[in-house]
Amino acid sequence: MKPQITVSVCMITYNHQEYINKAVLSVLKQKCDFEIELILLDDCSTDSTKDVIDIILQNNQNSSRIKYVRQKENIGMMSNFVDALKLCKGKYIALCDGDDYWTDVNKLQKQIQFLETNKEYVACFHNAEKIGIGFNGEKYCNFNYSRDVSKEEIILAGGAIYPTASFFFRNEIDIKEFDLKSRAGDTILIYHLLNKGLFYYFNDIMCVYRKHLNGVYTSIKMDNNKIIEDLKSNIKILIFYRKKYCKKFRPLFNETIQNQLLKISSIKGFEFVIKMRLINLISFYDLCNFIKKKFFKL
């Protein structure tokens, strides 16, 4: 009988031939007193990512922990992410993209110990070192010490409050809520977990966040049209969760939506936001609040 999996590490990859080896090995080197599995999904990479993974599977003594799936065709980041989540059987899930990596061999042990001891928490994350384009070893998070992270902070940050490779959470997710047309998997995930418990931040650098030319985030930032699509996707997510959660959080969701609309307006102009209302991407209420914030600074 196989031991029960305690932690599933969810890793998605696409054209990461230069980085995937370091990402996978950083998971396999973890020192744990529990069983882990690495769910590794390749979105039909067109480079040598598959060859690198095959070498790891053949030669690494811990390769039995890896469940590797290569998509038959490219299905997009979000669909690949959802497929990976569906395969996670562990009590907990840890994230690490194929171009990032962990730097502390005790990372999982620290995070599981915290959640096992503190049942009221649903997730925890930690700091990361930023490397690559435009970075020179800076910290990802600006928090100065380990602490609780409020739901208000998470909402106002638009969900983008943690490095992906730092996130560790209880496997209590409902896959049906994930919009496959979105690129904002991290945002949906943390909003989805908002009403399931508390969040904790460790002020320790235990992973590396890498920015490179082939990265999804980098490519989005290099194309204004993709930036707009990303912001529109975020607004759609915010509107969904504004309806779902109690009235206490609605003003925070409203403010975050207005901030997203201001970013859109700064790129495409005021008229573009008006068009978003005309095709029902935002409500009349959101449009009025946007106008107040943009022109009257209320």
Image (cartoon, rainbow, N blue to C red):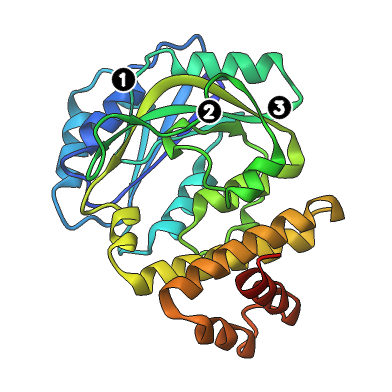
The residue that appears at 52% across and 70% down in the rendered structure is 232
**Front-most of 151 and 266?**
266
Q: Position of residue 5 (x, y in %)?
A: 54, 25
Residue occupied by mark 2: 143
User: Where in the figure is residue 133, as x and y percent of width and height?
Assistant: 22, 45
Answer few, some or many: residues within 10 Å of disc 3's Cα (few below 14, many 20 plus, some between 14 and 19): some
Query: Is 45 located above or below residue 38 in the figure?
Result: below
Q: Secondary structure at mark 3?
A: strand
Residue tagged 1: 62
SS type, badge 2: loop
Instruction: Say whether marks 2 and 3 touch (CB < 8 Å).
Output: no
Measuring from the top left, give residue 239's x and y in whole percent. Answer: 68, 66
**Viewed as shown, does residue 118 lie left or right of 93?**
right
Q: Secondary structure at mark 1?
A: loop
The Cα–Cα distance between marks 2 and 3, rounded to whole angstroms, is 19 Å
Q: Which residue carries the number 3 mark?
A: 121
Q: Residue at 23% across / 29% down in the picture? A: 22
Q: Nearer the viewer, residue 133 or 120?
A: 133
**152 or 44: nearer the eye?**
152
Q: Is residue 152 above or below residue 72?
A: above
Q: CB atoms at circles 2 and 1 under 8 Å apart? A: no
Q: Which x, y percent locates residue 229? A: 45, 71
Q: Earlier in the sequence, mark 2 or mark 3?
A: 3
The residues tagged by marks 2 and 1 sit, at their Cα atoms, a distance apart of: 35 Å
Q: Residue at x 55, y 62 (%)?
A: 234
Looking at the picture, does residue 132 appear above or below residue 251?
above
Q: Nearer the viewer, mark 2 or mark 1?
A: 2
Q: Of callouts 3 and 1, which one flags the residue occurring earlier in the amino acid sequence?
A: 1
In which image quadrant can residue 62 be found?
top left
